[in-house]
């Protein structure tokens, strides 16, 4: 028996299932006509049940209201969610494998990742050279791109995937992306590009440069992916997630946070190369941060997962009236 909500029906008997970690109740997000009778809902629930039993997959939805206009549903409306995964550490990073394999429990995972280390490339897009896409031997739906995380997401979504992904996930970055780090981060940029393309997206990092508990971040990624597929995200919003590097059961919770501020300790190292030429290398000590409540840094200090909603609009709205009061003359 289907239970009618605003624009979806929930079919509890057909969409309950157990996975490795937890009992999950999935609801079917369905665009249905308000005119449907309860008999039509039940008939549809029955047809879902058959699909459900055939491939044991819980998701059954369509974003296309017109497609729900009669009782004949094409198979594509029953497809598993398509999840695009990228990172900035390169396709061979163990942390990418940890993320992709965890998300297999949620949907059909396709990986498009840089062929080499691309950390701290920010939202760089390659406009002045061709890009090559190569299947990774032995891995179905894994492709390496000789470009940036942004290139990967753009190529996959605009051309290669064949259908629009339901979710873009970037990570798991080994090392925090907290506060001002987000502007440098290729990991965050991969998810940001997904958001620009109108797809629900999040970036996920483990706060340790050499993570001991990648499965903690992987497990939270599956939880968050399910949550987003069910509830969606606010418009023009991408989530930046940072996960303490501890066993999952030792986490203290999840905090919705704002971006804090870094205190970088960068030092420019100046040396001579073997042929007498000067070179410079950006180095220095580990960055610290400014202690403020409600920030991503504070969440991590308290052993909580930090989830920061980043907005597409970088305008400082509070500054608009003040700048307008002191007009800048031509
Ligand atoms: Mn990285």
Image (cartoon, grey):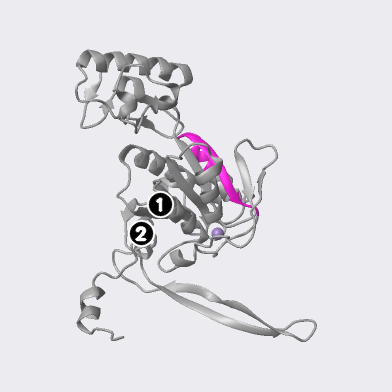
Q: Quadrant of the C terminus?
A: bottom left
Question: In terms of secondary structure, where does tag 2 sit?
Answer: loop
Q: Earlier in the sequence, mark 2 or mark 1?
A: 1
Q: Residue at x 64, y 56 (%)?
A: 130
Q: In the rendered picture of this protein, how many numbered marks are placed on residues?
A: 2
Q: Residue furthest front?
A: 330
* Residue 220 can be seen, yes or no: yes
Q: Position of residue 153 (x, y in %)?
A: 52, 50
Marks 1 and 2: in contact by CB < 8 Å? yes
Q: Residue furthest right?
A: 275
Front position in the image: 35 or 284: 35
Q: Position of residue 158 (x, y in %)?
A: 50, 46
Q: Position of residue 65 (x, y in %)?
A: 30, 30
Q: Which residue is mark 2?
A: 312
Snapshot quadrant of residue 290: bottom left
Q: Residue at x 64, y 60 (%)?
A: 129
Q: Residue at x 23, y 85 (%)?
A: 326
Seen in the image, is 231 located left or right of residue 200?
A: left
Please state the extent of the stretch shown in magenta in the rendering.
99-115
Seen in the image, is 95 located left or right of residue 49?
A: right
Q: Position of residue 315 (x, y in %)?
A: 31, 68
Image region (quadrant) for ligand 1: bottom right
Give the Cα separation between the discs numbered 2 and 1.
8 Å
The disc label shown at residue 208, or none: none
Question: In terms of secondary structure, where does tag 1 sit?
Answer: helix
Is residue 172 a member of the stretch shown in magenta?
Answer: no
Front position in the image: 284 or 180: 180
The disc label shown at residue 195, or none: 1
Seen in the image, is 204 located left or right of residue 38?
A: right
């Amino acid at each position: 028996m289907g239970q009618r909500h605003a624009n979806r029906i929930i079919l509890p008997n057909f969409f309950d299932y157990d996975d490795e970690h937890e009992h999950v109740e999935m609801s079917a997000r369905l665009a249905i006509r308000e005119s449907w009778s309860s008999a039509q809902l039940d008939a549809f629930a029955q047809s879902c049940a058959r699909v459900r039993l055939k491939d044991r997959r819980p998701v059954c939805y369509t974003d296309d209201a017109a497609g729900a206009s009669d009782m004949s549903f094409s198979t594509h409306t029953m497809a598993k969610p398509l999840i695009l995964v990228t990172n900035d550490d390169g396709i061979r990073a163990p942390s990418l494998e940890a993320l992709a394999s965890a998300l297999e429990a949620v949907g059909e995972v396709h990986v498009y990742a840089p062929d080499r280390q691309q950390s701290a490339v920010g939202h760089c897009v390659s406009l002045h050279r061709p890009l090559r896409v190569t299947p990774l031997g032995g891995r179905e739906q894994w492709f390496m791109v000789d470009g940036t995380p942004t290139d990967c997401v753009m190529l996959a979504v605009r051309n290669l995937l064949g259908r629009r992904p339901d979710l873009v996930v970037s990570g798991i970055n080994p090392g925090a992306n907290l506060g001002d780090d987000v502007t440098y981060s290729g990991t965050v940029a991969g998810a940001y590009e997904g958001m620009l393309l109108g797809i629900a997206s999040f970036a996920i990092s483990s706060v340790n440069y050499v993570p001991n508990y990648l499965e903690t971040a992987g497990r939270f990624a599956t939880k968050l992916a399910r949550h987003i597929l069910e509830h969606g995200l606010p418009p023009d919003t991408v989530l930046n997630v940072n996960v303490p590097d501890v066993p999952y059961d030792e986490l203290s919770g999840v905090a919705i946070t704002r971006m804090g501020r870094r205190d970088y300790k960068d030092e420019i190292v100046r040396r001579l190369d073997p042929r007498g030429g000067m070179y410079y290398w950006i180095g220095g000590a580990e960055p610290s941060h400014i202690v403020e409540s409600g920030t991503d840094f504070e969440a991590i200090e308290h052993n909580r997962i930090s989830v920061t909603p980043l907005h597409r609009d970088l305008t400082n709205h509070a500054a608009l009236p003040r700048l307008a009061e002191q007009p800048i003359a031509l």
